[in-house]
Image: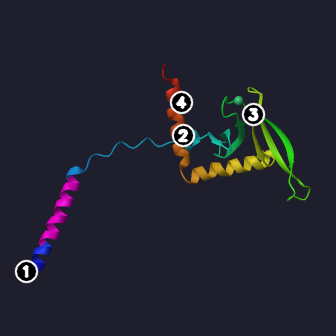
Amino acid sequence: MVRFAVAIALSSGVFFSLASRLLRRKPLPPSPAPLDWRSFTEFLYEGLKWVWRYDSSGHVVTIVPLCPVCFYQVDLRSDARPDSSTYYGLRDVTIFWCDHFKEVKRQLDGNFHEITIRVHKEINRLYDTHEWENIVRQQMTSRSQNRAPQ
Ligand SMILES: [Zn+2]
């Protein structure tokens, strides 16, 4: 008899929580329109803004570094730094110069080809994790805010 009462109490408890869940259910907000992955053409990485295009097969081509502040295309200078761990005692670095501000924006390890491979890998990682969608939505938001009248 006690067991029976517990069963009723349990089942009525389940019923009420189900009912209240059903009553609380609200219509889902409209999901945002799907994005075209080809709209992902720029991002910030290693302190620089990187932009690229897609060829007709959808491959990333022409990766170009821009100044993250003024968006001028930065000039590149190849250089080397002492590094006792390498055979020649030097390692390649690339210096990114903004001609608008007349200042070095960044110095990254590797020659420019090696750096663009790293950038390309990061672009692929952002595709795989779908993080590119957040980046594109943020860019769309900041663009529409910039267009708004002051
Ligand atoms: Zn600049």
Give the mark nearest the N terminus, 3 or 2: 3
> Element under label 1?
loop
Packing grade of label 1 (10 A; few <14, some 14-19, many >=20) is few
- Which numbered marker is on residue 74? 3
**Segment tinted magenta in the rendering:** 8-22
Q: CA distance from mark 4 to mark 1?
A: 69 Å
Residue drawn at point x = 17 percent, y = 65 percent: 13
Name the residue at 68% across, 44% down.
Answer: 46
Residue under circle 2? Answer: 136
Q: Which residue is mark 4?
A: 143
Mark closer to the chain start, 4 or 2? 2
Q: Which residue is mark 1?
A: 1
Instruction: Give the CA separation, mark 4 to mark 3.
Output: 22 Å
Q: Is mark 2 within 8 Å of ligand 1?
A: no
Q: Earlier in the sequence, mark 1 or mark 2?
A: 1
Q: Earlier in the sequence, mark 3 or mark 1?
A: 1
On the rendered image, what quadrant is the N terminus found in?
Answer: bottom left
Query: Is 150 in the magenta?
Result: no
